[in-house]
Image (tube, coloured by chain):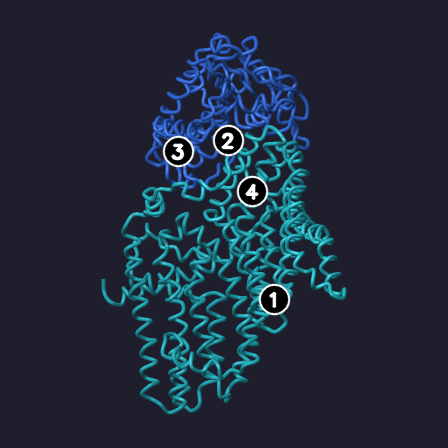
Chain colours: A blue, B cyan
Amino acid sequence: MVDGVAVRVQGLWKQFGDQVAVAGIDLELPAGKFVGLVGPNGAGKTTTLSMVTGLLRPDHGTVEIAGHDVWRDPVGVKARIGVLPEGLRLFERLSGRELLAYSGRLRGLPGAEVDKRAGQLLDVLDLAGAQHKLVVDYSTGMRKKIGLAAALLHNPEVLFLDEPFEGVDPVSAQIIRGVLERYTTSGATVVFSSHVMELVESLCDWVAVMAAGRIRAHGPLAEVRGEASSLQEAFLELVGAGGRDHGSHLDWLGGGAR
Amino acid sequence: MTGEEGTKGEESVTAVFVALKLSLLRNGLRQSPVRRTTYITTLVLVSVFAAFQFLALVVLRGNAHAASVTVLLLAAMALGWAFMPLFFPSGDETLDPTRLVMFPLRPRPLVRALLVASLVGVGPLFTLSLLAGSAIALAHGAAAFVVSLAAVPLALLVCVALARAVAAANIRLLSSRRGRDLALLSGLVVGIGAQLANFGMQQLGSAGLGELDPVADVLAWVPPASALGAVHSVSEGEYGAGLAQFALSAAALVLLLGVWSRTLTRLMTSPDGSTLQAAEPAGKRERRSGGLARLLPDGRTGTVMERSLRYTWRDPKTKAAWATSLVIGLLVPVFNVLKGTGSVYFACFAAGMLGVQMYNQFGQDSSAFWLVAMTISSTRDARAELRGRALAILLISLPYTVLVVVVTTALLHDWAGLPKALGLSLALLGAMLAAGTWSSARFPYSIPQEGYRNVAPGQSGLATAAIFGGMIGAVLLCAPVIALTIWLSVEAGGDRWSWLLPPVGAGYGALLVYLGLRLSAPQTARRLPEILAAVSKG
């Protein structure tokens, strides 16, 4: 990996009509780390990740992954990254196993190798029992897991996950976590977005805080957290929502019917 | 509880359900002006049609075939009642017993209330007008009129109870994913049924109503048509037969209500297992890549072909589109032959209908296209992707096109026209695939996964332009082969050379497909994010 930087983003900007979704992001994400992109709903996390992975064309700005420009060198980039987007479908009329076989072969891996890896991923992700079921009949947790399997199949250097734990039951979440931890200890990079601070705090070495289309803070977890007792508190401080207390307006709430 | 109180309670349940039905109707109309306009237009059209039907039936009075026509109409109507709930499961919320589970209702008053509530609506009104008209057409003599006073409501109740019983029996299926898939295919059944009915009517127009009599004689003993059969029999003085026919319909009503009531009780006292039911058989059945996969080419092309072919069968929208193309592509040339207006060139219709499948390829993926986009990093990848999709379509459409041409020729005994029609069809198929490939890359639009619409709001202009522009383009692309065919037909002795047309058409078609892929692949590779954005709407 070039100079320890997995992803280099410069001046990234995206506007939908009058609405500025991402307002100029400069960021260098370190390689071999568990990187968390945190922010409230509507902060521009999904838009940023879509642009970084080449699924959405930015208005301005450049993105380099492992030294390759996403838009000028797609061959160099697409083989090196794995993506699990949020809110996009899968080929849901394939079974879990067929989906893995399909996406592995699309990436040009030899068929036998794809089938071997798919079998192992299905086992580890506890999907072996449902491998012949159509993805359309999967639960949210199963969908996230099969999407993760498809993103890992070609052993990418950098993995981008958009809200991988959203709507996932605790058991599936623990399985996903285990797989991701094993993957990063081998030197690979995971970039994932979330608005659950406790999760980010327990998983990540490095965080970037996003709000209203901008990066508010970034760096190693301890640095971003600073003096605050938790990432949650530091985050509320950063996005300017800290210390808000509307409790007194709801003084009738609770304490029995009156 | 005394008997009187019980009756009172039941009456109020019925009143509540009728009120519920009316408020659901009113609120549905209040939702949007479009819906209101649609509903009012439908209501007016149905009323006008019902009025005309009523008048036509009254005019039929005294006609020798009146009994056959009315009995057949009612039988068709009953068939419609039986199938409607399967096609439009979400049409009536009072239908769904699972919504009533939390209320303390007993089966008998519930069935009565639901039955009465289902009599409110356009459908029952239309059926009533049909029945009343039929009764007037059939009844001769006081006895017959008295019978029809009972027969008309009886037939109506049988129709409604039939719909409810069928719906209740299938509610588990209808609320599952499989059921929704099935509902999507229903448009197809209606479309093809309409084609067949239309053809049947035209045949009848030439052959006369007498053709119907044997069928009607049987149906006159099948409920609910047997209720009208009873009116007819009594008019003819056959009181015994009339009584038996009436009893048959009445027995059917009792039976249907019994089945319905039992299903309702079971539904409301046992847990909903719709997802379990839908998921289990799929889990048990091994899905293997069969022998076909081994015959497909290696690499991306084969992988894409396999996925496309699986979707042809498994995705309800794709399946419906294919089935429509296959059926209409064959029916149009064959019906034209049967009507005597046939020409071997009608066989080209199949090539046109099947070629349409290539249009908006990426829209068929919907937002799952991101998986494809993530794996296309060069023009070569894009070409393999498009080639795989075109080959998957060719695998079905090429043999089918040849088959339709041969069948049409055989029906017409116009073997001299075979090479011309075949050459034109093959060229047209190639041109359609080429134009489809190009417009897939240039004008993608999304296909909503739910509901019957095939275009997302705001993209219908784009969709129309892409398909019609593509079709006109395809015909223009075929111009050289068309010109050659015409020239060989008018030139003296040209027919001697017409054997040349199939290879020329096939070669020209293949060339067009090749050029289409070459032109569209760079477009596709360059515009991946734009295509993804266009197909992810809706």
Q: Residues within 10 Å of mark 3 (few under 14, many from 20)?
A: many
Image mark 1: chain? B
State whether residue A231 is above or below residue B262.
Answer: above
Image mark 3: chain? A
* Cα gap from disc 4 to disc 1, whole angstroms: 33 Å
Name the residue tied to disc 4.
Answer: B389
Q: Amino acid at mark 2?
A: Glu
* Cα gap from disc 1 to disc 2, whole angstroms: 58 Å
Image mark 4: chain? B
Name the residue tied to disc 3.
Answer: A142
Name the residue tied to disc 1.
Answer: B415
Q: Where's residue A141, x and y in %?
A: 40, 32
| Residue A94 sits in quarter | top left
Q: Amino acid at mark 4?
A: Arg
Residue A86, which numbered label? 2
Question: From where the camera sits, is residue A191 visible?
Answer: no
Q: Nearer the viewer, mark 4 or mark 2?
A: 4
